Amino acid sequence: MDSLDNARESDRESDMDRAIARRLAKLRTLPVDTTRLDRLLSAQLPDRAAKRGWPRIGLQPVRALAASVAILAVVGAILLSSSGGPVLASATQMAQVHEDMVAGRAPAMQVDSIAGANKALAAQWPQSPEIPNVPQDHVMACCMKSVRNKKMACVLLKSEGVPVTMTVANAADMQLPAVPTVSHNGIDYRVQSVAKLNMVMAERNGRWVCLIGELPAERLMDLAAKLQF
Amino acid sequence: MDPQEATKRFYDLIWPQRAAVLRIAQILARNIHEADDLAQETMIKAFKAVDRFQPGTDAKKWLMTILRNARIDRLRILAATARDISLDQLPLEPAEASAPEGGEAVDVLENPQDVLNRFADQDIIDALQCLSEEVRWTLLLVDVEELTHDEVATILDVPVGTIKSRTHRGRAMLRRALLPMAKDRRLIRE
């Protein structure tokens, strides 16, 4: 019996150690603010642009170029403000979207595939951004939400048995939050958390994509990497 | 190497890893300013040595080696300033903490992952900071950064077997540190 008890104890310790390893791995997505570090480094390192071997050109063309850029920026800003410009969906808003979807509080359409979700959404909102395909994950429902008149297509999935909401909008309509960036498989994600919910946001193929769920941010980024546009 | 080319290489390949460097520095250091200074020193050293970095190899692994050396330099200076002792005299691997009285309550855990996920990141970092420098480094590289045992052995310049035993020991130490906290906070059912 002693050896059996020892084996059980050892198994429990192994389970706990694996859990500790997974909990430590979550620290990898710990948001860090590099503002102060960037400031310290910029005082000591050569300027990035100046050292990229830009061709030497006369001062007058530079001034002309700067003036053109400034005019374009002003025109762009006017156009942007008249069209409403990109909007920022806060982490709290996105968490609410997910919770409403999971709790069935959002008026959603039951679907069983991304193709079905795209079809259902396009039937009601012809301008709906196309939702990228997610291989091997069970699709449950979809709906349309808006943030300051910018439309977001939402779809509720089940990934690794955990509900995950994917929201998709046109990249031009949405602003990425000013939070630290996490690079994963060559894609830059903005990672945020609200209570137990993690969310990862990125711009890909002209679309703004946000995945929200109780999965570690790393898993959400794995899922995002599988999206087929 | 041409200075312009070196600068371009630094900004293209090394600069994007600064957040990872800062994150590890924050877990190693006791306060945010110390972490910023350590990360800054690491990035400056990386810039000066960028001509020795081989494009196509792992920039993060390369930076971790620099960070590790910068940290050792700092600890040496601190030790010399404080008590004029060498790093060799510092208790880098102290004896393991003793188990709480009455043994561990592992058998009452229904879902260890769920319990651990209820701890704030700062709780986990605080527990890590109670570990010895070498064990902490090992867990940071193996579990947080998910580098292979071979890669960590190269960075820390010790045999792979040492990394495996430190990993096992470090996780056990964390388990022993976190379980009483979980009990105090009633995160686990007796």
Image (cartoon, coloured by chain):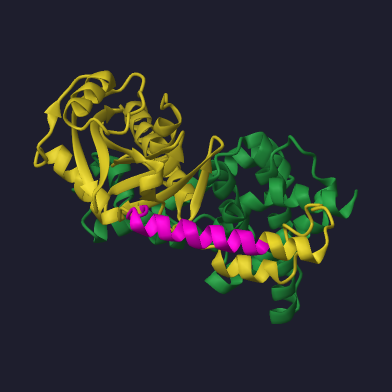
Chain colours: A yellow, B green
Above or below, B150 against B8 in this view is above
Q: Quadrant of the N terminus of chain A?
A: top left
On the picture, is A32 further left or further right than B87?
Answer: left
Residue B33 appears at what percent x and percent y?
57, 73
Magenta segment's dominant SS is helix
State the residue at coordinates (26%, 24%).
Answer: A118
- Give the magenta-colored segment's residue range: A66-86
| Occupied quadrant, residue A213 | top left
On the picture, is A72 further left or further right than A133?
Answer: right
Q: Quadrant of the C terminus of chain A?
A: top left
Residue A76 appears at what percent x and percent y?
47, 56
| Occupied quadrant, residue A155 | top left
Residue A105 appears at what percent x and percent y?
9, 42
Residue A141 appears at what percent x and percent y?
17, 29
The answer to whether any part of residue B31 appears in the image is: no
Above or below, A113 against A71 in this view is above
Question: Foreground: A15 or A44?
Answer: A44
Question: Foreground: A89 or B94?
Answer: A89
Q: Is residue B51 magenta?
A: no
The answer to whether any part of residue A224 appears in the image is: yes
State the residue at coordinates (62%, 50%).
Answer: B17
Q: How many marks?
A: 0
Q: Is residue A85 magenta?
A: yes
